[in-house]
Amino acid sequence: MRTAEIKRKTAETDIFVSLNIDGSGKSEINTGVGFLDHMLTLFSRHGRFDLEAVCRGDVDIDDHHSVEDIGICLGRAFLKAAGDLRGIKRYGSIILPMDEALILCAADISGRSYLNFDLDIPSEKIGTFDTELTEEFFQAFVRNFPITLHIKQLEGKNSHHIVEGTFKAFARTLQAALETDRKYADEIPSTKGVL
C-alpha cells in the first residue's frame, strides 16, 4: 500500500498530512483556509486518494504561508508514498469541463520539477481566498514531488469554476499517472532505468 505521513513545523505553520494513494477518496481536511479545504476535499474525492491535512498557520496575517506549506507537504507525501515508481503508468492527462470552464491538465511523473501554469482567473479573491495562491500551491507541490505539470485554461469566466476545475483535473491526472499496471509491475517506466 502506498501511504505516507508528513509533519512539518515552522515559525509560520504547523502541518500534518496523511496520504493513501490507493484509497477510496475519503478526507479529513482542516487547513484554516476554507476555500483550500474545499479544493483538497474534492481533490481527494476525484483522485480517490485518502487524505488528511491539518494546518495551524498564521492566517491572521494572510493565507499565503498555509497554502504554500500545504503544497510542500502534499508534494512530499506523494513523493514518499509513491516509492520507487515501479510499475506506474507515468503519464496522465485530461480535459475537464466545469460548467463554462474547461481545463487541460497533463502530468509526467518524470523526476523533473516543472510547472506550466496558464490560468486567467478574473477575480483577485474567491471569498477570502487570494486567487494568486492557486499558482503558489501548485509550484510548491511540483518542487517537492518532482513532476512535469501543465495546467491550461481553455475556457472559463467564473473564478470559482476555473480553480475548482483545475483541482479536479489535477486529481484525475495524478491518479491516472500513478496508476499501476500489473504487466509492468517490476519496471521503471523510463529508458534510463530511474525516474
Image: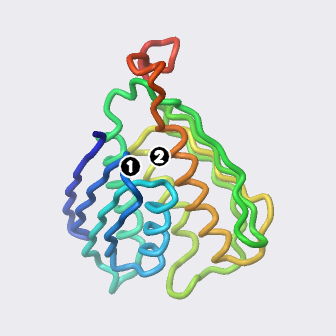
Q: Disc 2 designates what residue?
A: 142
The C terminus appears in which quarter of the rendering?
top left
Quick check: 140 above or below 134? above
Quick check: 174 above or below 124? above
Disc assigned to residue 75 = 1
Q: Quadrant of residue 87?
A: top left
| Gap in angstroms between the C-alphas marked 1 and 2 | 7 Å
Of 36 and 60, the residue lying toward us:
36
Q: Position of residue 151 (x, y in %)?
A: 65, 52
Q: Could you tell whether 139 is left or right of 119 in the image?
A: left
Q: Residues within 10 Å of mark 2 (few under 14, many from 20)?
A: many
The residue type indicated by label 1 comes to Gly
Q: Quadrant of residue 153?
A: bottom right
How many tags in the picture?
A: 2
Residue at 58 percent of width and 34 percent of height? 91
The N terminus appears in which quarter of the rendering?
top left
Q: Could you tell whether 79 is left or right of 112 in the image?
A: left
Check if mark 1's residue and mark 2's residue have beta carbons within 8 Å: yes
Of 12 and 182, the residue lying toward us:
182
Residue at 51 percent of width and 68 percent of height? 133
Disc assigned to residue 114 = none
The residue type indicated by label 2 comes to Val
